[in-house]
Amino acid sequence: MSFFIGIDCGTQGTKVIIYDAVKRQIVSSGSARHKLISQNDGLREQEPRWWIIALDIAMKKALASFYENKKLISAIGVSGQQHGLVVLDKERTVLYNAKLWNDTSTALENDILVEQAGGISGVIKKIGTAIPVGYTASKLIWLKRYKPQIFSQIAYVMNPKDFINFYLTGVICTDFGSASGTGFFNVLKKEWSQQMLDVIDPSGVLTAALPTLFSEDAPIGYIRPEIAKKYGLSKTCKVSIGSGDNMAAAIGTGCIKNGVGTITLGTSGVLSIFTDKTPVRYPSIVQIQNLLSKSWIPTICTMNATSTTTCVQSLFGLDIETFDRKLKKTTPGANGVSIFPFFNGERMPPLPCAKGIIAGLACSNFTQDNIIRASAEAVAFCLKWGYSLLKKKGINLYQMSIVGGGSNSMPWQQIISDVFNVELVSPANKEAGALGAAILAMNICKEEELSTLCDIHIRFTKQKIKPKKEHVFLYEDIYNDYIESRNFFYKLK
């Protein structure tokens, strides 16, 4: 059988694709949006049941336009937002809202955890990577501190993607990639870190609640009979372990070779670069996450990407097409205007309580066009800063795939190519997370080795964005000035 389902449960919504492995194309899709609970203190939560409601809607949309017998669908793979916290009691009932990856209300708890673990160096010694604000660990401390009755009832801990798998199969488990974003998993040894677990919760509640670990090529099992009946699928339809959205997007863009990276312009900005060399003594700002069993993707993640340009669009009442048209006419450096886009706080650099700043304004350059340009450049500069740290560790890019909502903007792509001085390629399928999940579903059916599956099923558009030499030269100074100003305004060393 040649049909596979890829599910991507993100912050804003859930997407479902049905992939034809013979024709090598998506033949049907559906989506549904999620609500978000948001507060000024940085709290960002969702009710897990909202994901299931969205999944049912998206799945029914995709299956409604599927032209073959639904029972020919062999397997399902799930990609999902990372770092979120879902807790269940012994009856497997959700105890509390899921605190999301971009929840910065636990910044104090994160600081306390890092201090108790021996500082940043102590954390890295225990788990091989640092713990930025937003990881699962500080959310558990927050829950124990402010909701002790709920914490005491915890029997199962999982990420959002794992909750979707639980709904589909009834099995509670996780993969190495998702586990590497929790803050209590050793990314070098690829096992739960008892040392860090004891720091977070010496009572043992957390340790007892941990999900079983699966490798990326392992099936969880079959879809539950009642879910198979609901969707009209075969009871023999398998479900793969899947992975977090960054890992699934890396697979879905072919980021499984040294020197290849994926940049995602979504609500957040993410740069992931593949390496098969064990990451040792990386800067604490870099998230070390597991990809495949014998590889890693050092990851740079900013909390402000399309959220930045969306703020500017809203300010000036612009639709996306008008924003892009104006952006295309602007020049590098925005005539001296700089935006430090920490509107949602930031975790790279670690500024969870920061606010955004527009700097360099004068009567002569205070224009709509310059602010538009500065907003797009700001995202590129923030990600470039992270990449500069990776270069010092011998990680070099020769090509990047670009995905996410912001990748639809050609002038923004050109800015990124110029700032990084790297060629950009665009996957023919923009749903990288869902496609990566579908490829992981193929893998458990032993279609081919994962690397071969990526070679076969990931295709790119003919259009490549190459850096403009004259802009690359200009951006060297513009970028350095930007970072120097950022450090001044936010008192960073």
Image (tube, rainbow, N blue to C red):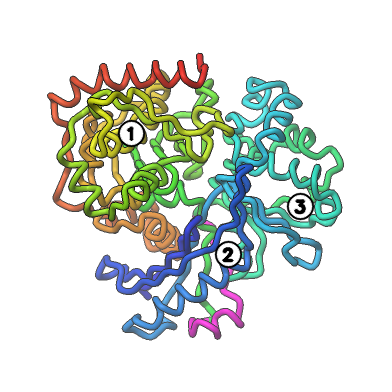
Q: Is residue 226 magenta?
A: yes
Residue 81 point in image, percent of width and height = 52, 52
Q: Amino acid at mark 3?
A: Ala
Q: What is the distance, in whole Å, between disc 3 and disc 1 at their CAs?
A: 40 Å
For residue 164, which numbered disc appears in the image?
A: 2
Q: Position of residue 281 (x, y in %)?
A: 53, 20
- Residue farthest toward the top in the current orientation of the protein: 493
x and y percentages locating residue 408 in the rendered image: 26, 52
- Between 172 and 369, the residue placed more toward the observer is 369
Which of marks 1 and 2 precedes in the sequence?
A: 2
Judging depth in this view, the residue of 266 and 377 nearest the camera is 377
Residue at numbered disc 1: 380
- Residue 321 within the segment the image draws in magenta: no
- Chain part drawn in magenta: 217-234
Q: Which residue is mark 3?
A: 209
Q: CA distance from mark 2 to mark 3?
A: 17 Å
- Nearest to the observer: residue 310 or residue 96: 310
Write the residue at 73% across / 29% down: 112
